[in-house]
Amino acid sequence: MPHTDPAPFSTVERLQDTFAAADYIADRALALTVKLAADLGKPMLLEGEAGVGKTEVAKVLSRALDTPLIRLQCYEGLDANTALYEWNYARQILHIRIAEQDHESRAHLEKTIFSDQFLLDRPLLAAIRHPGPRPAVLLIDEVDRADEEFEAFLLEILSEYQVTVPELGTFKAAHPPYVVLTSNRTRELNDALKRRCLYLWIDYPSPEKEREIILRRVPGVKAGLAASITTAMQALRRVDFYKRPGVAETLDFSRALLGLGIDELTPEALLDTAGVVLKYRDDIDRLKALGAERVIAGDLDLGER
Ligand SMILES: Nc1ncnc2c1ncn2[C@@H]1O[C@H](COP(=O)(O)OP(=O)(O)OP(=O)(O)O)[C@@H](O)[C@H]1O
Ligand SMILES: [Mg+2]
Protein backbone atom coordinates (compact mmCIF):
# COMPACT_ATOMS: atom_id res chain seq x y z
CA MET A 1 0.00 0.00 0.00
CA PRO A 2 1.56 3.32 -1.03
CA HIS A 3 1.79 5.78 1.80
CA THR A 4 -0.50 8.76 1.99
CA ASP A 5 1.30 10.51 4.81
CA PRO A 6 3.68 13.04 3.23
CA ALA A 7 5.94 13.03 6.30
CA PRO A 8 5.76 9.53 7.79
CA PHE A 9 9.02 10.00 9.71
CA SER A 10 7.97 13.16 11.52
CA THR A 11 6.95 11.39 14.73
CA VAL A 12 7.19 7.89 16.17
CA GLU A 13 3.39 7.66 16.33
CA ARG A 14 2.99 8.55 12.67
CA LEU A 15 5.54 5.97 11.77
CA GLN A 16 3.63 3.37 13.78
CA ASP A 17 0.47 4.34 11.87
CA THR A 18 2.30 4.09 8.57
CA PHE A 19 3.48 0.60 9.45
CA ALA A 20 0.02 -0.39 10.69
CA ALA A 21 -1.45 0.73 7.37
CA ALA A 22 0.96 -1.75 5.75
CA ASP A 23 -0.23 -4.45 8.20
CA TYR A 24 2.88 -4.44 10.33
CA ILE A 25 2.53 -3.92 14.05
CA ALA A 26 5.53 -1.87 15.09
CA ASP A 27 6.14 -1.30 18.78
CA ARG A 28 7.62 1.96 19.97
CA ALA A 29 11.19 0.69 20.06
CA LEU A 30 11.08 -0.38 16.42
CA ALA A 31 9.37 2.78 15.19
CA LEU A 32 11.92 4.83 17.09
CA THR A 33 14.80 2.94 15.50
CA VAL A 34 13.35 3.41 12.01
CA LYS A 35 12.82 7.11 12.64
CA LEU A 36 16.30 7.67 14.04
CA ALA A 37 17.86 5.71 11.20
CA ALA A 38 16.08 7.97 8.71
CA ASP A 39 16.89 11.15 10.64
CA LEU A 40 20.56 10.32 11.09
CA GLY A 41 20.98 8.65 7.70
CA LYS A 42 22.33 5.50 9.33
CA PRO A 43 21.69 1.85 8.54
CA MET A 44 19.67 -0.13 11.08
CA LEU A 45 20.79 -3.52 12.24
CA LEU A 46 17.92 -5.75 13.33
CA GLU A 47 18.84 -8.86 15.24
CA GLY A 48 16.52 -11.49 16.64
CA GLU A 49 15.42 -15.10 16.56
CA ALA A 50 14.02 -16.60 13.37
CA GLY A 51 10.60 -15.44 12.25
CA VAL A 52 10.18 -12.40 14.48
CA GLY A 53 9.67 -9.95 11.63
CA LYS A 54 13.13 -8.61 10.80
CA THR A 55 13.06 -9.00 7.02
CA GLU A 56 9.49 -7.78 6.90
CA VAL A 57 10.54 -4.37 8.27
CA ALA A 58 12.38 -3.62 5.03
CA LYS A 59 9.53 -4.90 2.88
CA VAL A 60 6.96 -2.85 4.74
CA LEU A 61 9.15 0.24 4.66
CA SER A 62 9.45 0.05 0.90
CA ARG A 63 5.73 -0.55 0.47
CA ALA A 64 4.81 2.24 2.85
CA LEU A 65 7.14 4.71 1.16
CA ASP A 66 6.25 3.45 -2.30
CA THR A 67 9.89 3.01 -3.19
CA PRO A 68 11.75 -0.03 -4.56
CA LEU A 69 13.05 -2.74 -2.27
CA ILE A 70 16.53 -3.80 -3.29
CA ARG A 71 17.52 -7.03 -1.62
CA LEU A 72 20.90 -8.55 -1.03
CA GLN A 73 20.59 -12.04 0.42
CA CYS A 74 23.83 -12.93 2.17
CA TYR A 75 25.39 -16.39 2.20
CA GLU A 76 28.74 -17.96 2.84
CA GLY A 77 31.10 -17.13 0.00
CA LEU A 78 29.18 -14.06 -1.18
CA ASP A 79 31.77 -11.78 -2.73
CA ALA A 80 31.95 -8.11 -3.54
CA ASN A 81 31.43 -8.65 -7.27
CA THR A 82 28.17 -10.49 -6.90
CA ALA A 83 26.94 -7.83 -4.53
CA LEU A 84 28.08 -4.79 -6.49
CA TYR A 85 28.19 -5.17 -10.26
CA GLU A 86 29.24 -7.54 -13.00
CA TRP A 87 30.00 -7.10 -16.65
CA ASN A 88 27.62 -8.81 -19.02
CA TYR A 89 30.20 -11.07 -20.68
CA ALA A 90 27.79 -12.77 -23.02
CA ARG A 91 26.63 -9.47 -24.47
CA GLN A 92 30.16 -8.13 -24.60
CA ILE A 93 31.32 -11.11 -26.65
CA LEU A 94 28.38 -10.84 -28.98
CA HIS A 95 29.14 -7.18 -29.44
CA ILE A 96 32.80 -7.92 -30.18
CA ARG A 97 31.83 -10.44 -32.88
CA ILE A 98 29.56 -7.94 -34.58
CA ALA A 99 32.12 -5.14 -34.24
CA GLU A 100 34.80 -7.33 -35.83
CA GLN A 101 32.62 -7.83 -38.87
CA ASP A 102 32.11 -4.09 -39.08
CA HIS A 103 35.90 -3.54 -38.78
CA GLU A 104 35.44 -1.29 -35.78
CA SER A 105 38.67 0.09 -34.32
CA ARG A 106 40.07 -1.66 -31.29
CA ALA A 107 40.18 1.51 -29.18
CA HIS A 108 36.57 2.29 -29.92
CA LEU A 109 35.54 -1.26 -29.21
CA GLU A 110 37.23 -1.31 -25.83
CA LYS A 111 35.49 1.86 -24.89
CA THR A 112 32.08 0.56 -25.87
CA ILE A 113 32.23 -2.82 -24.21
CA PHE A 114 33.02 -1.23 -20.87
CA SER A 115 30.16 1.23 -21.02
CA ASP A 116 26.98 1.40 -19.05
CA GLN A 117 24.99 -0.75 -21.46
CA PHE A 118 27.13 -3.78 -20.56
CA LEU A 119 27.12 -3.16 -16.83
CA LEU A 120 24.87 -5.34 -14.70
CA ASP A 121 23.89 -3.60 -11.48
CA ARG A 122 23.87 -5.91 -8.53
CA PRO A 123 22.01 -4.84 -5.37
CA LEU A 124 24.58 -2.48 -3.83
CA LEU A 125 25.24 -0.55 -7.01
CA ALA A 126 21.53 -0.52 -7.85
CA ALA A 127 20.79 1.07 -4.48
CA ILE A 128 23.52 3.67 -4.97
CA ARG A 129 22.41 4.48 -8.51
CA HIS A 130 18.70 4.59 -7.67
CA PRO A 131 17.47 7.74 -9.39
CA GLY A 132 14.87 8.69 -6.76
CA PRO A 133 12.79 10.73 -6.21
CA ARG A 134 12.71 8.88 -2.86
CA PRO A 135 15.61 6.76 -1.61
CA ALA A 136 15.26 3.04 -2.20
CA VAL A 137 15.18 0.57 0.68
CA LEU A 138 18.27 -1.63 0.69
CA LEU A 139 17.79 -4.89 2.57
CA ILE A 140 21.00 -6.69 3.44
CA ASP A 141 19.44 -9.87 4.73
CA GLU A 142 21.10 -12.34 7.08
CA VAL A 143 24.43 -10.57 7.06
CA ASP A 144 25.77 -13.01 9.67
CA ARG A 145 25.89 -15.68 6.96
CA ALA A 146 28.42 -13.76 4.87
CA ASP A 147 32.14 -13.94 5.57
CA GLU A 148 33.98 -11.38 7.65
CA GLU A 149 35.81 -9.99 4.61
CA PHE A 150 32.46 -9.19 3.09
CA GLU A 151 31.50 -7.31 6.23
CA ALA A 152 34.62 -5.16 5.92
CA PHE A 153 33.69 -4.40 2.34
CA LEU A 154 30.14 -3.50 3.37
CA LEU A 155 31.48 -1.14 5.97
CA GLU A 156 33.25 0.81 3.25
CA ILE A 157 30.14 1.04 1.08
CA LEU A 158 27.93 2.03 4.00
CA SER A 159 30.24 4.83 5.06
CA GLU A 160 30.59 6.45 1.66
CA TYR A 161 27.59 5.34 -0.37
CA GLN A 162 29.85 5.47 -3.35
CA VAL A 163 31.36 2.90 -5.65
CA THR A 164 34.14 3.11 -8.19
CA VAL A 165 33.92 1.06 -11.35
CA PRO A 166 37.46 1.40 -12.74
CA GLU A 167 36.35 1.54 -16.39
CA LEU A 168 33.52 4.00 -15.77
CA GLY A 169 34.36 6.16 -12.79
CA THR A 170 32.81 6.78 -9.41
CA PHE A 171 29.11 6.66 -8.65
CA LYS A 172 27.92 8.52 -5.60
CA ALA A 173 24.40 8.09 -4.32
CA ALA A 174 22.20 11.09 -5.03
CA HIS A 175 19.60 9.55 -2.72
CA PRO A 176 21.40 7.30 -0.21
CA PRO A 177 19.14 4.32 0.50
CA TYR A 178 17.42 3.43 3.75
CA VAL A 179 19.46 0.43 4.81
CA VAL A 180 18.12 -2.48 6.83
CA LEU A 181 20.58 -5.18 7.88
CA THR A 182 19.27 -8.31 9.53
CA SER A 183 21.07 -11.00 11.46
CA ASN A 184 20.01 -14.21 13.14
CA ARG A 185 23.14 -13.98 15.18
CA THR A 186 24.68 -17.23 14.06
CA ARG A 187 27.88 -15.33 14.79
CA GLU A 188 28.75 -11.97 16.31
CA LEU A 189 29.16 -9.20 13.76
CA ASN A 190 32.21 -7.02 13.50
CA ASP A 191 32.23 -4.13 16.00
CA ALA A 192 33.07 -1.62 13.30
CA LEU A 193 29.98 -2.57 11.32
CA LYS A 194 27.83 -2.46 14.44
CA ARG A 195 29.14 0.96 15.32
CA ARG A 196 27.98 2.31 12.01
CA CYS A 197 24.42 1.08 12.57
CA LEU A 198 21.51 1.71 14.90
CA TYR A 199 20.97 -1.54 16.68
CA LEU A 200 17.70 -3.17 17.68
CA TRP A 201 17.04 -6.60 19.12
CA ILE A 202 13.59 -7.74 18.02
CA ASP A 203 12.17 -10.04 20.64
CA TYR A 204 9.26 -12.41 20.40
CA PRO A 205 6.10 -10.32 20.56
CA SER A 206 4.19 -9.55 23.74
CA PRO A 207 0.76 -11.25 23.99
CA GLU A 208 -1.01 -8.01 23.03
CA LYS A 209 1.20 -7.53 20.01
CA GLU A 210 0.89 -11.14 18.92
CA ARG A 211 -2.92 -11.02 19.07
CA GLU A 212 -2.94 -7.84 17.07
CA ILE A 213 -0.64 -9.35 14.44
CA ILE A 214 -2.93 -12.37 14.03
CA LEU A 215 -6.05 -10.21 13.66
CA ARG A 216 -4.28 -7.94 11.21
CA ARG A 217 -2.64 -10.61 9.09
CA VAL A 218 -5.18 -13.42 9.08
CA PRO A 219 -8.58 -12.02 8.22
CA GLY A 220 -11.35 -14.35 9.26
CA VAL A 221 -9.85 -15.39 12.59
CA LYS A 222 -12.26 -14.53 15.39
CA ALA A 223 -11.02 -12.58 18.41
CA GLY A 224 -11.50 -15.58 20.73
CA LEU A 225 -9.43 -17.89 18.55
CA ALA A 226 -6.73 -15.25 18.17
CA ALA A 227 -6.55 -15.01 21.96
CA SER A 228 -6.26 -18.82 22.35
CA ILE A 229 -3.58 -19.03 19.68
CA THR A 230 -1.65 -16.26 21.43
CA THR A 231 -1.84 -18.02 24.80
CA ALA A 232 -0.63 -21.27 23.25
CA MET A 233 2.23 -19.64 21.32
CA GLN A 234 3.43 -17.69 24.35
CA ALA A 235 3.35 -20.90 26.42
CA LEU A 236 5.24 -22.82 23.73
CA ARG A 237 7.98 -20.19 23.75
CA ARG A 238 8.49 -20.73 27.45
CA VAL A 239 9.49 -24.32 26.74
CA ASP A 240 13.09 -25.04 26.06
CA PHE A 241 12.50 -26.39 22.56
CA TYR A 242 15.31 -26.94 20.14
CA LYS A 243 13.63 -24.37 17.88
CA ARG A 244 11.10 -22.00 19.40
CA PRO A 245 8.31 -20.85 17.10
CA GLY A 246 8.32 -17.27 15.80
CA VAL A 247 5.59 -15.02 14.46
CA ALA A 248 5.79 -16.75 11.08
CA GLU A 249 4.67 -19.98 12.81
CA THR A 250 1.88 -18.14 14.65
CA LEU A 251 0.49 -16.94 11.32
CA ASP A 252 0.82 -20.35 9.68
CA PHE A 253 -0.88 -21.93 12.69
CA SER A 254 -3.74 -19.41 12.50
CA ARG A 255 -4.19 -20.02 8.79
CA ALA A 256 -4.05 -23.79 9.29
CA LEU A 257 -6.80 -23.69 11.92
CA LEU A 258 -8.88 -21.40 9.74
CA GLY A 259 -8.42 -23.75 6.79
CA LEU A 260 -9.57 -26.69 8.86
CA GLY A 261 -12.66 -24.79 9.95
CA ILE A 262 -11.59 -24.88 13.60
CA ASP A 263 -12.77 -21.92 15.63
CA GLU A 264 -11.94 -23.23 19.06
CA LEU A 265 -8.44 -24.37 19.92
CA THR A 266 -8.54 -27.84 21.49
CA PRO A 267 -5.63 -30.14 22.46
CA GLU A 268 -6.52 -32.34 19.47
CA ALA A 269 -6.40 -29.37 17.10
CA LEU A 270 -2.99 -28.39 18.46
CA LEU A 271 -1.61 -31.90 18.08
CA ASP A 272 -3.05 -32.26 14.58
CA THR A 273 -1.31 -29.08 13.46
CA ALA A 274 1.84 -29.40 15.59
CA GLY A 275 3.99 -29.68 12.45
CA VAL A 276 3.03 -26.15 11.48
CA VAL A 277 4.47 -24.78 14.71
CA LEU A 278 7.32 -27.11 15.63
CA LYS A 279 9.82 -28.33 13.08
CA TYR A 280 11.79 -30.98 14.95
CA ARG A 281 10.62 -34.44 15.83
CA ASP A 282 12.08 -34.15 19.35
CA ASP A 283 10.19 -30.89 19.89
CA ILE A 284 6.91 -32.48 18.83
CA ASP A 285 7.58 -35.44 21.13
CA ARG A 286 8.26 -33.03 23.95
CA LEU A 287 4.99 -31.22 23.28
CA LYS A 288 3.16 -34.54 23.53
CA ALA A 289 4.96 -35.35 26.78
CA LEU A 290 4.14 -31.95 28.29
CA GLY A 291 0.49 -32.26 27.29
CA ALA A 292 -1.24 -30.11 24.69
CA GLU A 293 -3.93 -29.15 27.23
CA ARG A 294 -1.31 -27.41 29.39
CA VAL A 295 -0.08 -25.43 26.40
CA ILE A 296 -3.57 -24.30 25.60
CA ALA A 297 -4.19 -23.35 29.22
CA GLY A 298 -0.90 -21.44 29.13
CA ASP A 299 0.45 -23.00 32.33
CA LEU A 300 4.01 -23.89 31.43
CA ASP A 301 7.06 -22.63 33.23
CA LEU A 302 10.24 -21.15 31.88
CA GLY A 303 12.72 -23.74 30.66
CA GLU A 304 10.35 -26.63 31.28
CA ARG A 305 11.26 -29.75 29.41
N1 LIG B 1 5.10 -7.05 13.96
C1 LIG B 1 4.57 -7.74 12.95
N2 LIG B 1 3.44 -7.33 12.34
C2 LIG B 1 2.93 -8.03 11.31
N3 LIG B 1 3.46 -9.16 10.80
C3 LIG B 1 4.58 -9.61 11.37
C4 LIG B 1 5.20 -8.93 12.46
N4 LIG B 1 6.31 -9.61 12.82
C5 LIG B 1 6.39 -10.66 12.00
N5 LIG B 1 5.36 -10.68 11.13
C6 LIG B 1 5.14 -11.68 10.09
O1 LIG B 1 5.86 -12.85 10.44
C7 LIG B 1 6.44 -13.45 9.30
C8 LIG B 1 7.93 -13.64 9.51
O2 LIG B 1 8.58 -12.42 9.43
P1 LIG B 1 10.03 -12.26 8.80
O3 LIG B 1 10.19 -13.12 7.61
O4 LIG B 1 10.27 -10.81 8.65
O5 LIG B 1 10.91 -12.84 9.98
P2 LIG B 1 12.49 -12.81 10.13
O6 LIG B 1 12.75 -12.25 11.49
O7 LIG B 1 13.12 -12.17 8.97
O8 LIG B 1 12.81 -14.36 10.16
P3 LIG B 1 14.11 -15.16 9.65
O9 LIG B 1 15.14 -14.90 10.68
O10 LIG B 1 13.62 -16.57 9.66
O11 LIG B 1 14.43 -14.65 8.29
C9 LIG B 1 6.11 -12.58 8.10
O12 LIG B 1 5.01 -13.14 7.42
C10 LIG B 1 5.72 -11.27 8.75
O13 LIG B 1 4.79 -10.61 7.98
MG1 LIG C 1 14.38 -12.90 7.50
Image: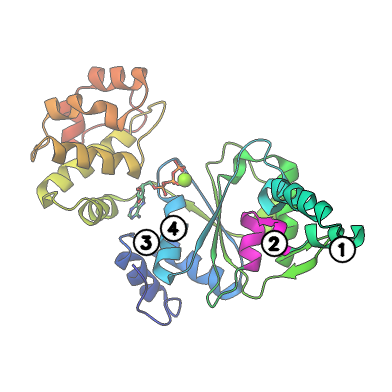
Give the residue displayed 35% in from the left and 78% down from the top.
4
The x and y percentages for residue 258 are 14, 41
Q: Quadrant of the C terminus?
A: top left
Q: Which mark is residue 27?
A: 3
The x and y percentages for residue 193 are 68, 54
Q: Earlier in the sequence, mark 1 or mark 3?
A: 3
Indicate the secondary structure of the residue bearing disc 4. Answer: helix
Give the residue displayed 12% in from the left and 25% down from the top.
268
From the image, state whether disc 1 or disc 3 is nearer to you.
Answer: 1
Q: Which mark is residue 108?
A: 1
Q: Quadrant of the N terminus?
A: bottom left
Considering only vertical position in the picture, is 296 above or below 285? below
Would the CB of label 4 be found within 8 Å of ligand 1? yes
Q: Of helix, strand and loop, which mostly describes the magenta segment?
A: helix
Q: Earlier in the sequence, mark 3 or mark 4?
A: 3
Indicate the secondary structure of the residue bearing disc 1. Answer: helix
| Residue type at numbered disc 3 | Asp
Give the residue displayed 33% in from the left and 44% down from the top.
247
Using the image as rendered, state which of residue 186 and residue 167 is in the foreground: 167
Q: Which residues are magenta?
A: 116-129
Q: Earlier in the sequence, mark 2 or mark 1?
A: 1
Label 1 to label 3, Cα distance in Å? Answer: 58 Å
